[in-house]
């Protein structure tokens, strides 16, 4: 199990912490990570690909902020390898999820269990922010019945490759309507804190409703980028993932992030990059 990486940061209204927690690993088809062909063809190509990548982490992020504790994404659960797990989603999605991914998640790696290592119970998480609705980002929701769960309105209404039969029955998220904001460099965003130092920003491409979270404590900024890309190199090279829903949106998002990073010290933290925790720990900025 990957150890939790923790970092102290100074928000406007007090000291805070950021924790990186990996909820197990996943391997995907190589063409799922790196597209061959355009929007449509790349999907066929990854499904036909016989080669898998090395295992990636599945990061979830805890932000201890003066205004409350936020969790960004909830990671994966140990029962993802149960043969029956995807049956309710019908033949195609059952096939897709059992043939295209190799998960390795121990019960002790689930988010609820790992939070206890930080002396944080799920009940202490006031807000859960979902970057998008893919299973490896939302499967840990089962622990957070008492938290306020935030999802971009568009992502909720127009999900891509989501598996609603696996959502907790009680799930009724707060739908966030992002908008133009003169205090933000990003086209669409909404503040998650009174202090305006935690923003939900629209980063479409991987899904059309995909969002990231931008934290701006003193001196630095941290972009919790979900699946904008699978690693930092992919953003530098501007390559697309076969998994991306819309390449045109993805390109626009890449450019927006790079433009921001050119003007601000920004640590780039995608969900499936082993180096994300290294960059968080060492404040290694995107350049
Ligand atoms: Zn995803």
Image (cartoon, rainbow, N blue to C red):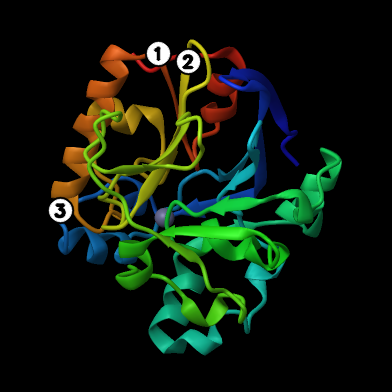
**Which structural element holds mark 3?**
loop
**Which structural element holds mark 1?**
loop
Q: Quadrant of ligand 1?
A: bottom left
- Nearer-the-camera pick, 77 or 157: 157
Tell me if mark 2 has few (under 14), some (14-19) or many (20+) residues whose alpha carbon lies within 10 angstroms of its own.
some
Q: Are marks 3 and 1 in contact (CB under 8 Å)?
A: no
Q: Position of residue 194 (x, y in %)?
A: 50, 36
Placement of the N terminus among the 4 image quadrants: top right
Q: Is mark 1 within 8 Å of ligand 1?
A: no
Tell me if mark 3 has few (under 14), some (14-19) or many (20+) residues whose alpha carbon lies within 10 angstroms of its own.
some
Q: Is residue 217 left or right of residue 162?
A: right
Where residue 37 is drawn, which disc sits there? Answer: 3
Distance of label 1 from label 2 (alpha carbons): 5 Å
Q: Is residue 234 left or right of residue 197?
A: left
Q: Position of residue 73 (x, y in %)?
A: 55, 51
Where residue 265 is drawn, which disc sits there? Answer: 1
Task: State the residue position of label 2.
Answer: 220
Tell me if mark 1 has few (under 14), some (14-19) or many (20+) residues whose alpha carbon lies within 10 angstroms of its own.
some
Where residue 40 is drawn, which disc sits there? Answer: none
Q: Is mark 3 within 8 Å of ligand 1?
A: no
């Amino acid at each position: 199990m990957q150890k939790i990486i923790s970092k102290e940061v100074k928000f406007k209204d007090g000291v805070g912490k950021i924790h990186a927690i990996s909820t197990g690993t996943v391997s995907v088809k190589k063409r799922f990570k790196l597209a061959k062909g355009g929007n449509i063809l790349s999907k066929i190509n990854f499904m036909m690909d016989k080669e898998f990548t090395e295992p990636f982490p599945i990061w979830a992020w805890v932000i201890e902020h003066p205004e409350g504790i936020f969790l960004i994404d909830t990671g994966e659960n140990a029962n993802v390898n149960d043969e029956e797990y995807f049956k309710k989603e019908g033949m195609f999605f059952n096939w897709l999820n059992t043939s295209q991914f190799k998960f390795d998640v121990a019960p002790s790696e689930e988010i609820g269990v790992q939070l206890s290592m930080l002396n944080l119970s799920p009940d202490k998480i006031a807000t859960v922010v979902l970057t998008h609705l893919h299973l490896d980002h939302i499967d840990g929701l089962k622990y957070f019945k008492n938290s306020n769960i935030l999802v971009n309105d568009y992502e909720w209404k127009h999900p891509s490759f989501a598996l609603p039969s696996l959502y907790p029955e009680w799930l009724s998220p707060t739908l966030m309507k992002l908008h133009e904001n003169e205090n933000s460099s990003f086209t669409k965003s909404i503040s998650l804190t009174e202090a305006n130092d935690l923003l939900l920003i629209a980063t479409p491409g991987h899904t059309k409703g995909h969002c990231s979270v931008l934290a701006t404590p003193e001196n630095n900024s941290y972009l919790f980028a979900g699946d904008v890309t699978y690693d930092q190199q992919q953003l530098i090279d501007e390559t697309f993932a076969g998994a991306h829903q819309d390449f045109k949106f993805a390109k626009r998002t890449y450019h927006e992030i790079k433009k921001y990073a050119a003007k601000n010290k920004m640590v780039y933290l995608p969900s499936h990059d082993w180096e994300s925790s290294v960059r968080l720990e060492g404040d290694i900025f995107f350049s």
